[in-house]
Image: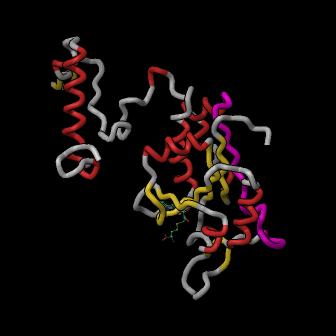
Amino acid sequence: MTDAAPFRASVLTLYPEMFPGPLGASLAGEALNNGLWSLEARNIRDHGIGRHAKVDDTPAGGGVGMVLRADVLAAAIDAASPAGDMRPRLLMSPRGKVFRQGDAHELVAAGGAVIICGRFEGVDERVIAGRSLQEVSIGDYILSGGELAAMALLDAAVRLIPGVMGKSESGHDESFEHGLLEYPHYTRPRDWEGQSIPEVLIGGDHAKVARWRREQAEALTRERRPDLLDKRGRLV
Ligand code: SAH
């Protein structure tokens, strides 16, 4: 492969036309055009079986729906990720470990990922161990396919690639980066529908502003996401 982008994503899907989709716009789209990352969407059906390029079959043991075949998926994975490809192989799955900000940083450090998007009832269990797939979820709800989940985690990772975010949009204070939710933001006009910008933000005392923001971030986190704090109210 001649592609030398610092972050390489290969997505295996039955709907390659969905990509780059939203990843082609704004920050991620500009970075894609500038070669800071690369994206190939590969059609699993290219490895389908027979004249109809069949990719799925009925579940062993009975039941509703269809299951993606292990042999078809393995052939697609082998073509996308030949021996020596060190990128992690992620299977989008509601059963997986829930994706967090730290995982986005890890993906960037790994230089990209091979991402498999399930459809129907999911995939034949054997391919998970057979091709060392890590199951990744984006939350406790069921999507109709892995494509939107893949886009969500690629978007989270791509913005962290060095050079993608300019200084002005840099993510240092952002929610989750320091284990806290972010403090509230304000901009012009100073008074809007009877609500004013908090006085401290207009006073010009940077130390006071920093303290106020920290307090706000802690209060918001305690109120909305106590799971991010330990029993003593400290960051976990
Ligand atoms: N029968 C499965 C759900 C299948 S949904 C179950 O109950 O666990 C079809 C596909 O959508 C999955 O194979 C997966 O690739 C994707 N998907 C659905 N919800 C997801 C989520 N929360 N996170 C990541 N991928 C998801």
State the image quarter where residue 69 is shown.
bottom right
In-front residue for pair 219/63: 219
Residue 184 drawn at (x, y percent): 26, 31
* Residue 43, x across and y down, in percent: 72, 57
Asked if 157 appears above or below 10 in the picture, the reply is above
Name the residue furthest right: 51
Please tell me which residue is depicted at 64% across the width and 31% down the height of the picture.
36
Which colour scheme appears in the figure? Answer: secondary structure
Q: Please tell me whether residue 115 is drawn above or below residue 26 in the rendered image.
A: below
Magenta stretch containing residue 173, yes or no?
Answer: no
Q: Which residue is depicted at the point 68% across and 52% down?
A: 16
- Residue 43 vs 95, above or below: the answer is above
- The answer to whether one can see residue 26 in this image is no
| Residue 64: quarter of image | bottom right
Residue 19 visible, this angle: yes
Tell me where the magenta segment starts and ends, as one range. 34-53
Residue furthest top in the image: 204
Tally of numbered discs: 0
Q: Nearer the viewer, residue 188 or 216?
A: 216
The outermost residue toward the bottom is 61
In-image side of 69 versus 98 (left or right): right
Residue 151: horizontal and vertical position, in percent? 55, 47
Q: In the rendered image, which quarter is residue 14 located in?
A: bottom right
Placement of the N terminus among the 4 image quadrants: top right
Q: Where's residue 72, x and y in %? A: 73, 68
Q: Is residue 174 left or right of residue 29?
A: left
Q: Residue at x 16, y 18 (%)?
A: 199
